[in-house]
Amino acid sequence: TLEERLLLKPLERGREDVIVAGICIVLETLDAFAVETLTVSEYSLREGILLKALAREV
């Protein structure tokens, strides 16, 4: 329910009404590419690029 989705801690306010559609897209994409697992990172693309660049300099 919408009330249950509002209780999800990492979910930003205002996104509770689109989370179901987003999950459907993710599940269909995983199915289309026959992927069984999904890794979720707490970091963003920016941090990944920065860490990769720093690793090259060391």
Image: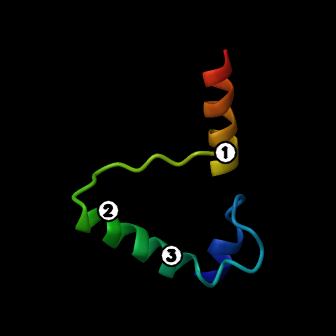
Residue 29, x across and y down, in percent: 34, 68
Q: Position of residue 28 (x, y in %)?
A: 32, 72
* Tag 3 residue: 22
Residue at 67% x, 79% y is 3
Q: Quadrant of residue 8?
A: bottom right
Marks 3/1: CA distance? 19 Å
Asked whether 21 or 58 is in front, the reply is 58
Identify the element where label 2 is drawn.
helix
Report the Cα–Cα distance between label 2 and label 3. Answer: 12 Å
Mark drawn on residue 43:
1
Question: Which disc is residue 30 wearing?
Answer: 2
Q: Are marks 2 and 3 in contact (CB under 8 Å)?
A: no
First in sequence: mark 3 vs mark 1: 3
Quadrant showing the C terminus: top right
Label disc, if present, on residue 51 of the rendered structure: none
Mark 3 or 1: in front is 1
Query: What secondary structure is found at the residue carrying circle 1?
Result: loop
- In this rendering, the answer to whether 17 lies above or below 25 is below
Q: Position of residue 44 (x, y in %)?
A: 66, 50
Residue type, label 2: Leu
Horizontal arrangement in the rendering, residue 24 relative to residue 46 (left or right): left
Mark 2 Cα-neighbour bin, 10 Å: few <14, some 14–19, many ≥20: some
Which residue lies at the image location 64% right of the left edge and 41% below the top edge?
A: 49
Q: State the SS at label 3.
A: helix
Mark 1 residue type:
Tyr
Query: Real-space Cα distance between discs 2 and 1?
Result: 21 Å
Relative to 21, say whether 45 is above or below. above
Residue 42 coordinates in the image, percent (x, y)? 65, 45
* Label 1 neighbour load within 10 Å: few <14, some 14-19, many 20+: few
Q: Quadrant of the N terminus?
A: bottom right
Side of 4 where 37 appears, left or right: left
Three-letter amino acid code at the position of disc 3? Gly
